[in-house]
Image: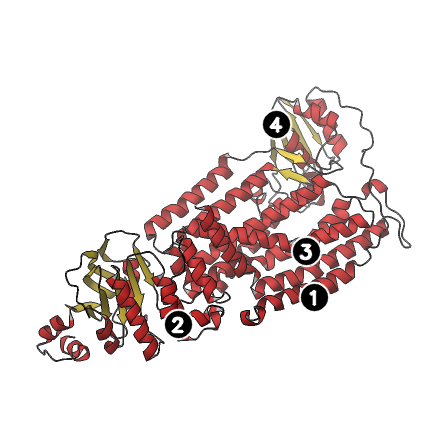
């Protein structure tokens, strides 16, 4: 891939993207969407901080990550799911339907560099789409709000990876299918399928739960908790590359059917090999309140357990205790204990009424020793495990996170998001569509 | 018109067959293109002209036969229905495509095809004939020595057709091999050195007009009369 060639292609794809009505509409929509989420979030946060007539919540429970960042970025979730696939599909489908792709395939630019340039253009588009989020965060800071750079970066990375995978999926679909509509339906079907898998796997163990950890929604949830799972980052890049390889195989009309099948199978095998053997449980807790970690003293103790640890959770998937336990305890245990195995024998059953005495219990086994408990409270679980391992549980104090209550009202936010932004986008679009002769005078 | 039957073969099509939906679209078509000549692929609608070009360019799989080129990457195919990037200026399209080959746009082609006044227009706003001329300039600007042009004069008026023909002839004289499909037989006679007559996916004859007239047994026949006599 020559640099000059990629630059020429990226320039063409950026012009195609930024000059399209679809992208203008997307940029137009994102301003008010982010604005609405942000302004609502600030009002709710202010009320929880004691603003208005309400009672102030405990200060340590007031985290800008949950209260401001996640809701403000929530608009991007909608955007990436429902609108981004269309602009990515359009970049490929337009050249396929006009026949321009046939010209490009006969140029020195390989299908791989053509697709890479589309991804570059889409990433450039992403930087424009992110402007309202940056504006929202600026309003928050200007109002005296607190932001933690690591957890903000984690959230931004999560959405960016999701955008990257969605764009690659859309590009692959547009390359495989003849019409843009078919490609769009395929992408939306895969998205809905991933939601179904996510729902089905809730509180379950085994391979279903393992696979479901890699759905876009599940991966994003971890970033929204300030957790940087290296696995999720690598999985996103592996999925992106595999999808682009598949897209290139279909885009190159001159490749024989046999070679195309070989390329697609090779991409799928490499991706599957990663998911089978290349996964890592390593992660970094970037949340300021260390919500994904036990206390340092507990972490040190748990990491020192060198025997296998088995936990069998006798709770049905739809039992709220199972969800609490999974979210508040198991996630942290997985990050901390090196040889941990978890089982959910009731995951596929509605066991609440079947009279099984074991229902609601959790069995902990460390080496040959085991104990049964009904508690899903973090401290009690830690005590059980550390005692089983022959360790002395440490003294645990109150969490050190101070919380950041703030009674704020971001002045001018509504004007910017609902007025100035749409006008700016419309004006830019109109100027970009003026006839060239008039523009050049 | 200079006949250059002695030109060196640059592209050899051997028994090319294409099937679609169990139906033979092309059935064992063979042809040799030579440097310095304009070869015409002639036939009615559905004869298989576009399919032959697509098969030679590698855009569709063949059921049999082979394409042997002096340089496998030395071939450029301009499809009939291609439209350049509709939201971009014509000048930009030509410059962008030339840049991929690390070249400048073909100024001579731009002048000859009367594209200068269209360079600032959006490609999507061009008429059929204008778009065809822009696409032709783009194809002629490529460095590949073999050009497959599907209906290059479609949508062009008589004056533009004359200019385009002169341009193609000059490029052939410079050493390129041009293979064009033309449904206007009068135009084909004016621009082509040799002909491949296709009918229902089969090659019914090939050669110069004189060769074909001799085959048809009518030395004064037009290409149309020759075709009707041989089909």
Identify the chain of the residue marked 1, using the numbered disc in the image: A
Q: Which residue is mark 2?
A: B114
Using a 10 Å C-alpha cutoff, classify the residue at mark 4 as few (fewer than 14 neighbours), some (14 to 19) or many (20 or more). Answer: some
Identify the chain of the residue marked 4, using the numbered disc in the image: A
Q: Work out which residue is located at the far right of the displayed protein and give it.
A: A53
Using a 10 Å C-alpha cutoff, classify the residue at mark 3 as few (fewer than 14 neighbours), some (14 to 19) or many (20 or more). Answer: many
Q: Residue at x 84, y 49 (%)?
A: A48
Q: Are marks 4 and 2 on the same chain?
A: no
Using a 10 Å C-alpha cutoff, classify the residue at mark 1 as few (fewer than 14 neighbours), some (14 to 19) or many (20 or more). Answer: some
Identify the chain of the residue marked 2, using the numbered disc in the image: B
Q: CA distance from mark 1 to mark 4?
A: 55 Å
Above or below residue A342? Residue A37 is below
Q: Which residue is mark 1?
A: A423
Is A147 on the left-hand or right-hand side of B219? right
* The C terminus of chain A lies in quadrant: bottom right
Residue A310, by quadrant, is top right
């Amino acid at each position: 891939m020559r640099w000059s060639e990629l630059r020429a292609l990226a320039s063409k794809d950026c012009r195609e993207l930024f000059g399209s009505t679809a992208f203008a509409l997307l940029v137009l929509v994102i301003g008010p969407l982010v604005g609405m989420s942000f302004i609502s979030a600030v009002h709710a946060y202010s009320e929880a901080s004691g603003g208005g007539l309400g009672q102030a919540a405990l200060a340590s429970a007031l985290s800008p990550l949950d209260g401001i960042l996640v809701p403000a970025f929530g608009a991007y979730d909608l955007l990436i799911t429902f609108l981004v696939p269309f602009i990515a599909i359009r970049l490929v489908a337009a050249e396929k339907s006009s026949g321009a792709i046939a010209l490009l395939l006969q140029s020195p630019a390989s299908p791989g560099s053509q697709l890479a340039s589309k991804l570059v253009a889409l990433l450039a588009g992403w930087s424009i789409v992110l402007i309202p989020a940056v504006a929202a965060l600026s309003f928050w800071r200007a109002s005296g709000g607190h932001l933690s750079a690591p957890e903000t970066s984690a959230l931004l990375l999560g959405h960016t990876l999701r955008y990257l995978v969605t764009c690659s999926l859309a590009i692959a679909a547009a390359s495989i299918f003849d019409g843009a509509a078919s490609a769009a339906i395929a992408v939306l079907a895969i998205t809905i399928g991933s939601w179904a898998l996510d729902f089905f796997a809730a509180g379950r163990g085994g391979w279903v739960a393992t696979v479901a950890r890699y759905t876009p929604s599940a991966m994003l949830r971890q970033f929204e908790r300030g957790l940087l799972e290296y696995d999720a980052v690598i999985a996103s890049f592996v999925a992106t590359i595999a999808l682009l390889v598949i897209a290139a195989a279909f885009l190159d009309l001159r490749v024989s059917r046999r070679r195309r099948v070989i390329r697609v199978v090779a991409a799928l095998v490499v991706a599957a090999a990663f998911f089978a053997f290349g996964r890592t449980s390593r992660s970094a807790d970037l949340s300021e309140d260390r919500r994904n970690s036990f206390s340092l003293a507990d972490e040190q103790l748990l990491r020192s357990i060198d025997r296998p640890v088995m936990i069998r959770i006798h709770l049905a998937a739809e039992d709220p205790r199972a969800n609490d336990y999974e979210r508040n305890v198991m996630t942290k245990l997985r990050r901390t204990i090196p040889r941990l195995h978890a089982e959910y024998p009731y995951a596929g059953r509605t066991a609440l009424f079947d009279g099984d005495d074991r229902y609601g219990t959790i069995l902990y086994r460390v080496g040959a020793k085991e104990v049964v408990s009904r508690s899903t409270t973090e401290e009690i679980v830690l005590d059980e495990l550390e005692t089983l391992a022959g360790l002395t549980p440490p003294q645990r104090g109150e969490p050190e996170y101070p919380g950041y209550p703030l009674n704020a009202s971001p002045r001018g936010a509504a004007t910017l998001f609902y007025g100035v932004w749409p006008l700016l986008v419309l004006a830019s679009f109109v100027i970009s569509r003026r006839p060239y002769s008039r523009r050049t005078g | 018109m200079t006949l250059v039957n002695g030109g060196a073969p640059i592209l050899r099509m051997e028994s090319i067959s294409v099937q679609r939906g169990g139906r033979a679209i092309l059935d064992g078509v063979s042809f040799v293109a030579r440097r310095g000549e304009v070869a015409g692929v002639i036939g009615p609608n559905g004869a298989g002209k576009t399919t032959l070009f697509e098969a030679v360019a590698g855009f569709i799989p063949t059921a049999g036969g082979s394409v042997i080129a002096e340089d496998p990457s030395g071939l450029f195919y301009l499809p009939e229905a291609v439209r350049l990037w509709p939201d971009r200026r014509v000048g930009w399209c030509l410059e962008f495509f030339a840049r991929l080959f690390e070249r400048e746009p073909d100024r001579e082609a731009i002048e000859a095809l009367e594209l200068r006044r269209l360079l600032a227009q959006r490609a999507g706003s061009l008429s059929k004939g204008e778009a065809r001329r822009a696409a032709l300039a783009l194809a002629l600007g490529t460095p590949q020595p073999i050009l497959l042009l599907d209906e290059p004069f479609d949508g062009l008026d008589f004056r533009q057709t004359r200019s385009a023909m002169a341009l193609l002839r000059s490029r052939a004289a410079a050493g390129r091999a041009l293979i064009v499909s033309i449904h206007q037989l009068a135009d084909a006679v004016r621009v082509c050195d040799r002909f491949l007559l296709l009918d229902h996916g089969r090659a019914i004859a090939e050669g110069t007009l004189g060769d074909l007239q001799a085959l048809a047994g009518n030395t004064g026949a037009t290409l149309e009369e020759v075709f009707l006599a041989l089909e």
